[in-house]
Image (cartoon, rainbow, N blue to C red):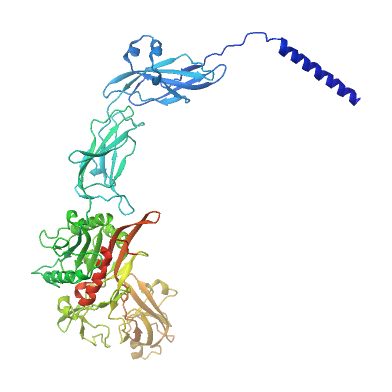
Amino acid sequence: MSRQRDLTALWVLMVVSAVMMLAAGCGRMEGEVNPPRPPVVDFVDVPPDSSTFDYAPVIYWKGSDPDGFVEYYSYADITDSAAIVMDDKLEYVDQIPDEAWVDTISTSARVYLLTEADEVQSHIFYLRCVDNDGMVSPVKYRTFFRENNPPNVPVIGVTGSPDEEWDNAIYVADTLYSAADVSAVWPGIQFSWRGSDPDDKSLFRIPLEFQAVLVRSPNDTVFTSQWSDETSIVISDLRTGFYTLYIWSRDDGLTKSVGPARAEFNVIRPTFEHNILFVLELPNQPPFPAFPAPDSVRAFYDRLITDVKPELENADLDLDSTDVRFFTVTTLGNASTVVPKSLLHQYKLVIFASDQLQFRQFGENYLNRRDEVLLAYLQVGGRVWFMGRQVGSVVLNWNRVAPREDLATLMSDFFAVDDIVSPSAVFRQVGGQPYAFAEFIATVAGLPDFSSMSFDPDRAAENCFAYADTTVRDSTGALVDTTFHYGVTGVERIERRTGGAETTQYFLSRTENATGRVWAEDSRIIDRIQLDATNTADAHPTGTNCYIQTEFPKVTRVDSVINVTHRELGMNNAIGEVVHISNVLVSSGPISQVKISYNEGQPWDDDDSLSVYYSYDPVTDYNRKPVEVRFERVEVVGLAVSRLRFRTALSVFPYYFMEYDAAKENFRLMLDWFLNPTINF
C-alpha cells in the first residue's frame, strides 16, 4: 500500500513538471500590465494660503502614492517677480532652476522666506514629491508674505557683571591683562551679549545669530567669527593695545541689526622684563609716630638687596632703580595710590613690605583695589610676597572690613592660606612705661637650607613697645616680675590650607619653655548656664559638687581648692577635691573648667571666695605655628608637560627686626626661589 502511494506521487510530479516546461517554452502571458501612477502631494491647513509672517514659519504638507510610496519631497521658495505677477503660478514651474529645489524626506520645514529689511515680500512656495518609481507629482503652491524689521542692536557686558552695566556700547575702565592661553587660574577676557527683535511676540521670540569682530586700533582686524547662536566669548593671547569688540546680530531672515554692540577695552600683555618691585606700605609718616621711621625701612631694604645681589643664582640684579624699583604708599593725601597695572606687569616679583607698627590704616577703597590688581597680576603669571607685621589684621585687613570674601578667596587660592590669626592686643602701663605682650622672639626654620632668625635687640627702640612678663602673679594678682623683655609686636600666625604651601619659618614664643603656677583667689564658681556644653550632665552647684573656672586656661594640675568663705564660717565642706579637669575651646578662646566635690552641705556659691593652687601650660597657641609660607602653582597641560602659573609667599613677621645675617641669608633663598625661571621641584 505504501509503495503504491509513492508511485502515484512520483507520477503527479512528472506531469506537473512537463506542463510547466511546455508553458515556459511554448506559451505567453495574456492581458494588460497596469502602468505606474504618479504620487500626489498637498499642503495641510497650517499655515493657510496668503499668510503674512514676521518670522520664519514652519510649513507642513502630506503626500501619498497609489502604487508604491513617496521617496522624498521637494520645495522651492521663489521671489521672482515674473512668478508673482502670473495669474497661474504653475506656469512658472518649468523656469525654476534645479538648484532652487530643496529635497527632504520630512513633511515639514522651517522656511526663512528671506526678505529685505522694512519690506513686505511675496513668496511663491512650490511643492512636489517623487515616488519609488521616480514619478513626480503635480506641483502645488501657496503664496506667503514676509515682513521683516531688522533686529535691535545687541547689548553687551563683561561676563558676570550686573545687568545695569550692560549697554549697546560699553567702555571697560580697568586695564585688562592678557596671557597666552586660558588656564585654571586665568579665565581669559570674557564678554557676553544678548539680542532682541522688534518682531518678537510674547509666545515666540525670533531666533537670532551673532557675529563677533575684534579690532585692534587703529584698524587691525584680529578675527571675525562665524555666525552662530553663541552669546559669549573668551579672548586670549592679545598684544598690548586698545581693542574694540563688535557684536552684530541677524534674524532668521538673515537681516542684520542696524548696528553692532560695541565693547572697548585696553589690554596689557605682561612683559616681566624687570626683576623686583618693592612696594613699601608705610602709612605712618612724620609728624605722626613711625616705628620704624620710613627712611630706616628704605635704607634696610637697599642694604639687603645690595648684599644679596652677588650671591643670587637665578637673577642678575641691576641696581639702577629700574630693574629693582621702590614704590612707596602712605596714607597722606593722594599717596595711598595702588601700584598701577602699567608698572606692575613689568616685574617678575612684587614684594609688599610693611614693617611699621601701624597706627594709621589704609582705607577700604585702597585695600579692595589692591586685591583686584594683585589677583589680575597673579592670574597671568605674577609673583607676590607679602611680608611684615600686622599683615593679617591691618595690611590685608582680614575679617575687619566687610565684605572681604574676595580677599579670603585670593588668599586661599593664591597663597594656600585659610586664615591669619592675630593675637589680642594687650597694652598696659608698668612703672609708668608702656608695654605690649610681644611673645614673638624668633623663628624656627622649617626647611633644611633655611636659618632660624632671632629678634635683633639693637632694634628694640624702634619696636615702639617693650614686653613685661605678666605670667607670674602674687596672691593679690599683682605682677611678681616686672622685668622688661623685648620681642616683636604685631606678629601673627598662619593657618595653611591643606596641601600646597610649604612652611619656611615657624613662630617661636617666649613661652616655649615656660611653666605656670598660681596660688590665688581668682577662680570662680560657675552655674550651669555658664558651663561649657560638655559639662552639663547635671545641675550645678549642688550640695556635694560644683564647677570652677580658673583665670588661666590649659590647666594641667590642681593641687588645692579651698572655699575661704565656708572655712571662715566654720562649715565642714570648705575643702574641695578635684573630680576632673576640662580644657575646652569656646568662641572667646581656651578655658579651663574643674569639677570639684566636697562634703555634703550648703552648696558652694558664686559669691564665695576661693583659694586655688594649680599649674597650667602657659605656652600659647602661636608657638611653633607657621609665620612664613610659600606656594608655587603648577598646572599639568599635557602629557608630561607642566607650566608654572604663579608663586606667592606670606611672611607675618618683619625681616627688619631680625638679626641681619640670618635675615639676609633667608632673603636670598626666597629671592632665588621666586626668580627661578623653571619649576622649583
Residue 480's place in the image compared with 302, above or below, is below
Q: Quadrant of residue 54?
A: top left
Residue 236's place in the image compared with 445, above or below, is above
Closer-to-camera residue (524/133): 133
Closer-to-camera residue (474/303): 303
Quarter of the picture holding the C terminus = bottom left
Residue pushed farthest left? Answer: 287
| Residue 218 image point, x, y percent | 17, 40
| Residue 293 image point, x, y percent | 12, 71
Residue at x-position 22% and y-position 53%: 270
Quarter of the picture holding the N terminus = top right
Q: Is residue 543 visible?
A: no
Residue at x-position 60% and y-position 11%: 34
Residue at x-position 25% and y-position 60%: 383
Residue 139's place in the image compared with 236, above or below, is above
| Residue 481 image point, x, y percent | 23, 87
Q: Quadrant of residue 206?
A: top left
Q: Is residue 353 visible?
A: yes
Residue pushed farthest right? Answer: 1
